[in-house]
Amino acid sequence: MAKFHCGIDFGTTNSSAALSCDGAVRVLELDPLNDNPASLPSLLYITNEGEQIVGRAAADAFIDRNVDREVQLKQVDLGVAIEAYVGGEPDKSETYRPAAAPTDVREGVRARATIEVNSPGRLFQSLKTQLRHTAFRGTEVFGTLYQIEELVACILRRVKAAVEEAAGAPVERVVFGRPVRFSTHDAENDVAQRRLETAARLAGFSEVTFFYEPVGACVEYALGIEQRQRLMVVDIGGGTCDVCVMEFGGARGAAARLAESRILGISGVPVAGDAIDREIIKSKLFPVFGSRVRYGPSRLRIPQYIFNEILDWQNLYKLNTEEIVHWFLAMEADCTAPGSVRALRMLIQRNYGYPVAREVESAKKRLSWEDEAEIRLHMDTVDIQERLEREEFTHIIEYNLERMMRSIEEAEAAAQVRPKDIDLVLTTGGTSLIPAIRHMLAERFGADRLLPRDTFTSVATGLATVAQYC
Ligand SMILES: Nc1ncnc2c1ncn2[C@@H]1O[C@H](COP(=O)(O)OP(=O)(O)OP(=O)(O)O)[C@@H](O)[C@H]1O
Ligand SMILES: [Mg+2]
């Protein structure tokens, strides 16, 4: 019976998988509903009845059921008492020692939480980014505690089912990709990989090996070329920008080429498509939602934390409390731009955070092919029509581009090479399509040395290839 080897690229935005057998590699169809069926959007929607919906259907279910719905919150007693300090005047004496036990009176208070009472379901996006957050262990979804590993496993189970259907047999061994750095902190990196491994085991894989994602993309190209080459890969996706420099000898045959390949240097930063979307929202949409508004007799500004929640639309509903809504209504009666405050209120009350984020992402993608794009959304009193020109976009994301460039320099330094020593720069990942990024790479390496590989599947193909030999 044919022996299949499996590679899985669990991405921040999209996941893909490939199978190799006797030297031939095949990318699998994971989501027939997606524009690109080889790419499964890494989205999970859990309904209030516990049904788990994955991929494009998850986004559709959320838009269909959650958007345009009046959110109702209620305070619940968690049934536990926590200690509270009834603070007196701060101790300003010279004998004050911060480590000493506080002398304030301690009291017990009942712990309470704000929950949504009528939610039909919850959507999870960019779960890979959450893997590194040690403080985020999991979340309660309609009374069931889902640990982060379990949430990721829900997506991986779907991938495993597609892999086994294509192989026609159970597949338990897998090579997974991982970014060079999930996080800039080493401890968070280790936690993230351990969690991803646990998620893979929960999904039913018993033997999990990890390879750096850009190394996967490099192998995908290099094993088919019988030539001595020094290659760089720049893989910029939704969550991370990953770079590697590898050297391949002139051996013939995939196994021999892989055996004599060397990783000369790697680097990575957690800056990619999601961070770029946030920059667009900050610069183009914060003003639409009142960041410049002054309200009340003292002409105050709307506090920054409200806008930070817009960047994290999954938690936006938490602002939908009676207290905050009344505050917005009062603000609308006495402020410099009532329309903007009303738009902000409707964004929160009608749950428009996700459609806004999707429209921003879609405009960003259009800008890769067009000189200008319009961010357009007309829902209720949320009326957005903002033109974004490519030049302005490049300016908005300048700092992100700098961080990516520093990562490239870091990989070169680790490999002890200069740009002229690199034969080819392979590019992959959705964000590598941005013209400003292509321009930045062309300036450093020359346009003739840039070689785009398949944007969404080159990593998985390389991982499945590697899986044959490990
Ligand atoms: N044409 C395009 N122009 C600009 N950005 C794009 C384009 N197409 C996709 N993207 C962006 O690319 C990102 C998704 O790319 P990709 O699928 O390679 O990421 P990923 O593999 O899921 O993430 P990561 O590797 O960081 O975990 C998203 O941020 C998306 O908005
Ligand atoms: Mg990727």
Image: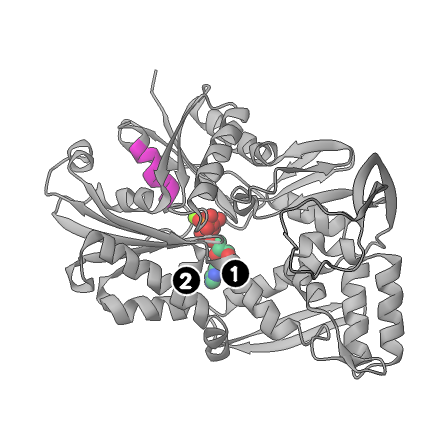
Quarter holding residue 8? top left
356 inside magenta stretch = no
- Could you tell me the amino acid type at mark 1? Ala
Task: Look at discs 2 and 1 and give the one toward the viewer.
Answer: 1
Q: In this view of the protein, which residue sits in the foreground, 342 or 335?
A: 335
Beta carbon at label 2 within 8 Å of ligand 1 = yes
The majority secondary structure of the magenta stretch comes to helix
To which residue does mark 2 refer?
A: 433
Where does residue 413 sit, x and y in percent of width and height? Answer: 23, 57
Is residue 464 a member of the stretch shown in magenta?
A: yes
Can I make out residue 230 in this image?
Answer: yes
Q: Kindly indicate the quadrant of the structure image that contains residue 203.
A: top right
Q: Amino acid at mark 2?
A: Leu
| Residue 103 vertical placement versus 289 (above, below) | above
Specify the segment rendered in magenta.
459-466
Q: Is residue 295 left or right of residue 189?
A: right
Q: Secondary structure at mark 1?
A: helix
Q: Quadrant of the C terminus?
A: top left
Q: Residues within 10 Å of mark 1 (few under 14, many from 20)?
A: some
- 204 lies above or below 452: above
| Secondary structure type for disc 2 | helix
Number of the label disc, if any, that sits on residue 275? 1
Q: How many marks?
A: 2
Report the residue at 39% width, 68% height from top.
402
CA separation in Å, label 2 and label 1:
15 Å
Q: Quadrant of residue 469?
A: top left
Q: Find out whether the residues at labels 2 and 1 contact each other: C-beta distance under 8 Å.
A: no
Residue 92 percent across, percent down from the top left: 70, 62
2 or 1: tag closer to the N-terminus: 1
